[in-house]
Image (cartoon, rainbow, N blue to C red):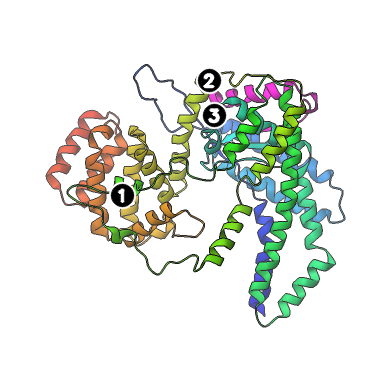
Amino acid sequence: MKTNKSRVSAILAAPRNAMRLVLFAATLFLASPGYGQQLSYHPFKKNIVKEKEIAAAITARLQQDVLNIRSNYKKEVAAIYKERADAIKERVEASELITDSAVTNYLDGLAKQIISGNSTLAHHNLRIYFSRTPWPNASSMGEGTIVFNVGLFSRLDNEAQVAFILCHELAHYLLNHGNNSIARYVETVNSTTFQTQLKEISKAEFSANKQLEQLALKIGFNSRRHSRAFEKEADSMALVLLKNTNYDLREASSCLALLDSIDKDKHAGKQALENQFNFAEYPFKKRWIENKTLSFTDNEKEKKEAKALADSLKTHPDCQLRIAYVEKELLQGKKNNTRKFQDQKKFETLQKLFEYEGLEYLFETDKISRCLFTCLQMLNAGDTHPYVLGLAGKCLTKIYTAQQQHSLSKIVSLPSPDFDEEYNNFLKLLQNVRLTELASIAYHFLQTHSTAGKSSEDFVAALIASKENAGKPEEKKEWINYYNSNFSNPKYKF
């Protein structure tokens, strides 16, 4: 019985934890490539003063929002408001928000075009920033903070699509969807019906856990149905806001079409793993990705149910329905601007830099398996930028050390039904490969890319480590000499 009650608490906590929305921070150096040159990228510095200003603004907004609560459960609503504000500030303090002026000025310029054309936005204290996270999403936190993930920006076709997404998130804020969701959640979990259900489940001797899961799922689906209605409302208002700019309204429809399949990896491609880890002197071994004990769906019925659940939990649900609605709205409108860009060159430069910044975020936050996997996908797609090669080398070195120290689980995910087949195969490899095999993979991988990667200090350091781990002392010595001769103010000591 005690176990069941603790699970009840966990179920109740889950939706509140979901309110701990993501806000991200970092800084960025913009460099436009010359003709025939690779784009220059360096991990970006942060603006500590700006981060403190953002945190202070979030605190001030929290105090204002608490004073304005109109609910029979004011204490409970205020607690969730505080959780939300604390979660956002944690992300700010962790430098997950891009605060470099070159980037914030660009985003501010886009936002100003929307705000200047829509007087309803003029007096709101808004905070609109890029997040360093590579997941393709944008969020309105509900209290004036809007976050645009670099992983979404790098997947779009033009600035008109960026403007539509900003309008969509601004619409969520203007329509108070975030706070309305909190109020509805609090009323639901405090309702007599819900509390009665919890009591009945806690008394059950059998199937209590399953009943709790079903109840939690029901709350989630009910909330999602409401949020889907919110999406339609936000799309409608977004078109109104976007119409008052000089951006092409038709890009709203093309943007939604893109979002319909955006949960798939940008550089997804079959055989990426085998291509990158297959060498003439050390061929890829199929047993590295075999695991007969793993079966996430056992039959066709379960596969169908899993697909239905996945469809319902998409990052951007119901896109086809939303496209039909948006296109109907567009047909009724008279104004039709055609502008897709204000600054196409900066847009395209930022897109590429943001891909690398997303990788840097993964590495900094110890999501090493995802970081290395994404590097391999990019290499397989033809991106042999020294930064990508250097980061792949750093990941391999870190994974080797973690396996050696029996701490692999801290930086490498386990296979999961939530991941696609390609990533699960990669995770199986990291679980199956022996330490000596991992040393050989790293050695041959880095040796193969040594010409393209030798301008990267991180790559050369990883190459030297791989030669140490593979028992190649003479080659190691040669590369140490190269390192010492070619990198001033070295980060590494050998």
Mark 1: secondary structure: helix
Q: CA distance from mark 2 to mark 3?
A: 10 Å
- Quadrant position of the C terminus in the picture: top left
Residue 274: mark in rendering:
1
Q: CA distance from mark 1 to mark 2?
A: 36 Å
Q: Who is closer to the viewer here, 176 or 105?
A: 176
Task: Give amino acid for label 2.
Answer: Gln
Would residue 162 be found to the left or right of residue 193 on screen?
left
> From where the camera sits, is residue 433 visible?
no
State which quadrant residue 414 falls in.
Answer: bottom left
Would residue 156 be found to the left or right of residue 385 on screen?
right
The answer to whether residue 156 is magenta is no
State which quadrant residue 169 falls in.
Answer: top right
Q: Position of residue 375 (x, y in %)?
A: 38, 42
Q: Position of residue 163 (x, y in %)?
A: 64, 28
Residue at 66 percent across and 47 percent down: it is 86
Residue 85: mark in rendering:
none
Q: Who is closer to the viewer here, 151 or 290?
A: 290
Task: Give amino acid for label 1.
Answer: Glu
User: Extreme left residue here?
Assistant: 474
Check whether the beta carbons of the residues at disc 1 and disc 2 lie within 8 A of each other.
no
Please report whichever mark, 3 or 1, sits nearer to the chain's N-terminal start.
3
- Quadrant position of the N terminus in the picture: bottom right
Q: Which residue is mark 3?
A: 157
Which segment did they paint magenta? 100-128
Task: Give amino acid for label 3.
Answer: Asp
Please rate how many residues cluster around mark 1, counting C-alpha atoms within 10 Å: few if below 14, some from 14 to 19, many from 20.
some
State which quadrant residue 23 falls in.
Answer: top right
Q: Position of residue 15 (x, y in %)?
A: 68, 57
Mark 2: secondary structure: helix
Q: Which residue is mark 2?
A: 344
